[in-house]
Image (cartoon, helix red, strand yellow):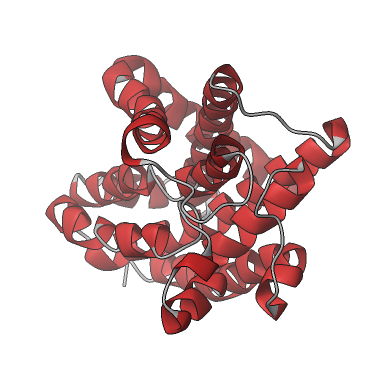
Amino acid sequence: MSTAGWAAVDSWTMTRRELAHWARQPVQVVVGLVFPVMLLLMFNYLVGGGRGVDGDTTEYLVPGMLALTMAFGLESTMLAVTQDLNKGVVDRFRSMPMASGAVLVGRAVADMLQSVAALAVMTGVGYAIGWRWHHGPLAALGALGLLLLLRFAMLWLGILLALVAGRPEMVQAVQILVWPVGFLSNVFAVPESMPGWLGAVVEWNPMSATATAVRDLFGNPGGGGGSWAADHAGLLAVVWPLALLAVFFPLAVRRFARLSH
């Protein structure tokens, strides 16, 4: 078998290891799926998301929550990485005849599978509360692809932060950063309803770009605006994640390679 073939086999073995943890810790998996659903229902029925929206607020809110869901759950990835580091599991894997990056690839693949499950649950709940997409299945698949691209980019940021933090107790301090990034976006309100300087910052948030592009592909309100960032949200929804990947993927791989030194 070629080197690439062995690397693929080793990565799949590490992916199966991560998936086996789901069976042993089902509560953690269920909580990860239910938490964004609770936020969606709370903002749709109690808090009143979609402030300043010209149209159905539920159809505005659901795509934004889909984008926000791609930021949630990173703490479980970070916690798994730091626990493996502290228990010596990573050192043991590195001493075995296996591809050096298989541990990170396996973790990434398992995380993306969980993200697909989260999107399936959220879209199902959104449909149940009245959300609809209007531009056909291909556009819907394109929207889901943009959401998963954002998740993949943020995943490597989470892995890098976990490798830098090194200890599970540091994860709680790091995961607090997810909330400002998530809420400083157009997930719950249009930028036009905010103070001018804040709305400008919100429009250039990578999550805002993905949320706006997804709304446009779904045919939901809030898919465009008067600013350059809003009018080119589809472009930014691709450029932002690729830029994050270009920065954090090599940094995470390099940090992982230096663990034994």
In the rendered image, which quarter contains the C terminus? bottom left
In depth, the one of 45 and 65 nearer the eye is 45
The mark tally for this picture is 0
Residue 87 is situated, as x and y percent measured from the top left of the image, at 19, 44
Query: Residue at (49%, 48%) from the top-left corner?
Result: 50
Is residue 181 left or right of 117 when viewed as pictured?
Answer: left
In depth, the one of 31 and 213 nearer the eye is 213
**Residue 109 placement: quadrant:** top right
In the rendered image, which quarter contains the N terminus? top right
Query: Residue at (41%, 77%) from the top-left corner?
Result: 195
Residue 167 is situated, as x and y percent measured from the top left of the image, at 17, 56
Query: Residue at (62%, 70%) from the top-left corner?
Result: 240
**Residue 257 placement: quadrant:** bottom left
Residue 62 is situated, as x and y percent measured from the top left of the image, at 55, 38
Q: Return the residue found at the far left.
A: 169
Residue 3 can be seen in this image:
no
Query: Residue at (47%, 56%) from the top-left corner?
Result: 189
Residue 106 can be seen in this image:
yes
Q: Return the residue found at the far bottom.
A: 197
Is residue 59 left or right of 101 when viewed as pictured?
Answer: right
Residue 89 is situated, as x and y percent measured from the top left of the image, at 29, 43
On screen, residue 76 above or below 101: above
In depth, the one of 25 and 2 nearer the eye is 25
On screen, residue 114 above or below 172: above
